[in-house]
Amino acid sequence: MRGRMFTFLVAAVGVIGMAGVALATHDEPSQAKKFQTGFITGYKACTAPNQMTTGTPALPACSAVREDAACGFGGVGKGKLKGKISGSGASQVISLSGQMSGLTGCDGLTLAFVATVRATSDGCDTPPCTVLDALTTDFATGISCGPVAAGACKFSGTVGPPLLTPGANLGLSLEGFSLTNGAGVHSFVAGQLYP
């Protein structure tokens, strides 16, 4: 799920200084200020298919390999994430909160919250522009969950100026949110269970 669910933080947004522009040059909705999702297990990408899915259509697939072989959900594990924009004008921030429970093999770990976003803005040399993906992939938010104790942890925090400058018709495509185990391994990713 690591690339199609949520995103936010953009160090590059602060770097390119997205300040207000009088008229928008790309279309964005009038409102999109809240987000809520769950967490699912992070799995490695399939690069060399060795089987097919069942059903129609049958799709090339790989044997599933967890990103984190040690830290994961137990039989009753669950996780959730909420995000919203709060404040106004230059004082806007993205507030994030969530919790994890029923984890196994995670006690003592501090899970770092990272985000992948695609930022498009009118605040650039020749509007509109989209920030280079490499700068907004697995962006460290400074928010963490932990240390995990008794299979559970909570997290909350805000991201905003100077890392994220609101305005200029800034649209953040939420590409992925993950909790990493400190070694860059995506133990948990924002997603939905489709049983």
Image (cartoon, helix red, strand yellow):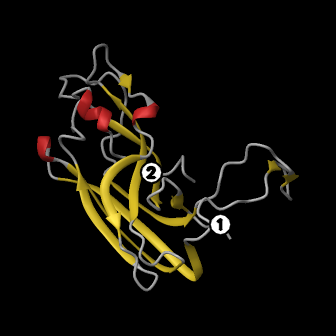
Looking at the rendered image, the disc whose residue lies closer to the viewer, 1 or 2, is: 2
Using the image as rendered, state which of residue 113 and residue 93 is in the foreground.
Answer: 113
Q: Residues within 10 Å of mark 1 (few under 14, many from 20)?
A: few
Comes first in the chain, label 1 or label 2: 2
Disc number for residue 194? 1
Mark 2, residue position: 6
Instruction: Give the quarter of the image for residue 10.
Output: top left
Task: Point out residue 178 in the picture as x, y percentages from the top left corner.
Answer: 47, 57
189 and 103: which is toward the camera: 103
Q: Quadrant of the N terminus?
A: bottom right
* Amino acid identity at mark 2: Phe
Above or below — where is 84 with respect to 28? Answer: below
Residue 120 x, y percent position in the rendering? 37, 30
x%, y% of residue 79?
47, 72
Q: Is residue 75 left or right of residue 23?
A: right
Compute the Cα span from label 1 to label 2: 18 Å
**In this picture, residue 32 sits left or right of residue 77:** left
